[in-house]
Amino acid sequence: RQEPRDETKEKGRAQVSADIAKFNAAQAALDFVKDGMIVGLGTGSTSAHFVRLLGERVRQGLRIKGVPTSEATRNLAEQAGIALLEISQVTSIDVDVDGADEIDPAFRLVKGGGGALLREKIVAVASKSMVVIADESKWVETLGAFPLPVEVTRFGFALTLERVRRVLRGTKCAGDEVVLRTSGKSNEPVITDGGNYSLDAHAQSIPAPEDLGAALKDIAGVVEHGLFLNLARTVILGQAKGAVIKAHESF
Ligand code: 5RP
């Protein structure tokens, strides 16, 4: 007799194996950190593995300073014993290690699922090199299946949301649904570390990420969007055992 499928168990197993892959990616990224470096510390579950592992290295004697990309990461890094710098104290960051929601073969990213895209982008842009760590499910042919996060001012957000929809249509995205990110039972809008709202743009497929990114930046009320273009130099895709390291050919 065939046992009935237990979907909860299957989901649990998939989550555990994704988490092992995230851990393996984070571990492989340690090789990119050298003594004396200033290191951008990303946000999310994969970055959290990296921060804890980096903390272990610091306890073993590695001398680095971290620049966190969110208050959550700041707390985690403090617990891990990593010395931190404010972004205002640095002119340049040696290496930024951060996760991603999607990565395409041109190393273009969708980020911001964890709501930290503004600080993540400021840190990535200030870094000499960006190393992306992710489980291999994040590698996609075309960006857009994961809803694109867009950080917007609270003032006039409904108007901004409509403009974002128009821009999705104008840049030939497959979908144009845009929703305000909320949480909790009472569906309160999520407030970012920067005090803004977050929209999730269900583009489904983004045929021209550069065009979409430029058009979003042009909307008054958009603070930043989650397309990270021309920033990642290295992508580390964690697997059940070990990780695959990909280097961008033009860097
Ligand atoms: C947070 C991010 C994260 O890097 C992204 O959401 C990936 O998260 P995870 O490592 O938990 O899969 O962009 O704003």
Image (cartoon, rainbow, N blue to C red):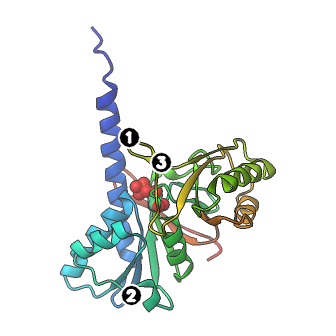
- For ligand 1, give the image quadrant: bottom left
Q: In x, y percent, where is residue 18?
A: 37, 47
Of 30 and 72, which appears nearest the observer? 72
Q: How many marks?
A: 3
Does dot 1 land on a helix, a strand or a loop?
Answer: loop
Crowd rating for badge 1 (residues with CA inside 10 Å; few <14, some 14–19, many 20+):
few
- Which residue appears farthest toward the left when viewing the image? 59
Instruction: Work out which quarter of the rendered image holds the C terminus and state it.
Output: bottom right
Of 143 and 117, which appears nearest the observer? 117
Name the side, left or right, on which 83 lies relative to 136: left
Tag 1: amino acid: Lys
Give the Cα separation between the discs numbered 3 and 2: 37 Å
Residue at point 30% right, 38% down?
A: 13
Q: In x, y percent, where is residue 132?
A: 48, 66
Residue highlighted by disc 1: 185
Q: Earlier in the sequence, mark 3 or mark 2?
A: 2
Do labels 2 and 1 touch, CB within 8 Å?
no
- Which residue appears farthest toward the top when viewing the image? 1
Q: Is residue 111 visible?
A: no
Residue at point 28% right, 69% down?
A: 76
Q: In x, y percent, where is residue 248?
A: 59, 69
Do labels 1 and 3 touch, CB within 8 Å?
no
Residue at point 37% right, 56% down?
A: 22
Residue highlighted by disc 3: 182
Q: In x, y percent, where is residue 153?
A: 59, 64
Name the side, left or right, on which 162 lies relative to 202: right
Give the Cα separation between the discs numbered 2 and 1: 43 Å
Label of residue 37 in the image: 2
Label of residue 157 in the image: none
Task: Name which quarter of the figure residue 233 lies in.
Answer: bottom right
Name the side, left or right, on which 150 lies relative to 33: right
